[in-house]
């Protein structure tokens, strides 16, 4: 009888653990990983405005990386010209490296960052995925120019609020890379205009 109760308790524990896991997965699917990361960081750092600024900055940076990785992969698949495929590959690789560095930095600061693109990023992806041929190439290149201008603007403004030296150093290095990406995107934009 005692063995039977132990077995039943073990099964009940396993079922409970599974249900908790599934509910966490459902929460992430419903809210999105950016929202969940922000909520977790708010709970962790609710007493420190500085830590909240650090966390929000890293969450936004992760969102940028995840979007650029996804769009870069799409450009490699759907791009018509070699220039667009090359630009997509460069963006995917550079932002994947940046995301890897960001994940390590966030972990060292116990900051939760998103692991999947936001709904806005997914919407951008779907709209771009509907394009083909020259239309795809033009929209992708224009998107790289505008999104990198926005990212640079965010990094320039928000990194001023950061007092953590490691985050500030990472932001400075990343800002330099974002400027290179913008220059390359503008260069490809000019090539595209001259060839079409």
Image: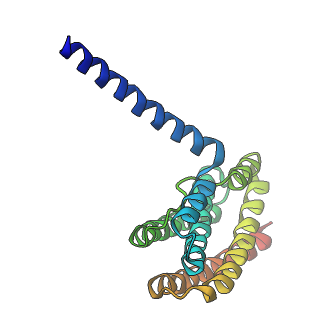
Q: Is residue 109 left or right of residue 138?
A: left
Residue closest to the eye, 189 or 32:
32
- Furthest-front residue in this view: 2
Which of the image's four quarters has the C terminus?
A: bottom right
Q: Quadrant of residue 158?
A: bottom right
Quarter of the N terminus within the rendering:
top left
Give the residue displayed 64% in from the left and 63% down from the top: 84
Give 96 or 118, whichever is nearer the viewer. Answer: 118
Q: Looking at the image, which residue is at 61% across and 57% down?
A: 34
Residue at point 73% right, 59% down? 137
Q: Which residue is at the far top? A: 1
Say above or below: 138 vs 170. Answer: above
Left or right? Give the position of 110 relative to 118: left
Where residue 82 sits in the image (x, y, percent)?
61, 61
Return the x and y of residue 75 as percentages of the image width and height.
63, 56
Residue 185 visible in image: yes
Count of numbered marks? 0
Q: Is residue 86 visible?
A: no
Q: Is residue 30 above or below residue 135?
A: above
Residue 7 position (above or below residue 52): above
Name the quadrant containing residue 42. Answer: bottom right
Q: Nearer the viewer, residue 45 or 188?
A: 45
Q: How is the image coloured?
A: rainbow
The residue sitting at 52% across, 41% down in the picture is: 24
Q: Is 32 situated left or right of 17 in this image? A: right
Q: Position of residue 40 (x, y in %)?
A: 54, 59
The vertical placement of 187 against 75, above or below, is: below
Where does the image place residue 133, in percent across and percent down from the top left? 74, 51
């Amino acid at each position: 009888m005692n063995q039977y109760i132990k077995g039943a308790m073990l099964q009940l524990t396993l079922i409970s653990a599974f249900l908790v896991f599934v509910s966490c997965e459902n929460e992430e699917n419903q809210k999105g990983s950016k929202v969940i990361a922000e909520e977790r960081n708010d709970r962790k750092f609710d007493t420190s405005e500085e830590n909240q600024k650090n966390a929000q900055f890293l969450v936004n940076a992760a969102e940028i990386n995840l979007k650029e990785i996804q769009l870069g992969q799409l450009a490699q698949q759907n791009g018509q010209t070699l220039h667009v495929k090359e630009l997509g590959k460069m963006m995917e690789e550079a932002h994947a490296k940046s995301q890897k560095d960001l994940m390590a930095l966030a972990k060292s600061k116990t900051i939760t960052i998103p692991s999947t693109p936001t709904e806005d990023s997914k919407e951008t992806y779907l709209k771009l995925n509907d394009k083909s041929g020259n239309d795809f190439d033009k929209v992708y290149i224009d998107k790289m120019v505008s999104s990198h201008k926005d990212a640079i603007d965010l990094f320039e403004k928000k990194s001023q609020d950061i007092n953590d030296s490691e985050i500030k150093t990472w932001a400075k290095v990343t800002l330099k890379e974002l400027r290179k990406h913008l220059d390359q995107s503008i260069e490809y934009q000019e090539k595209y205009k001259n060839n079409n």
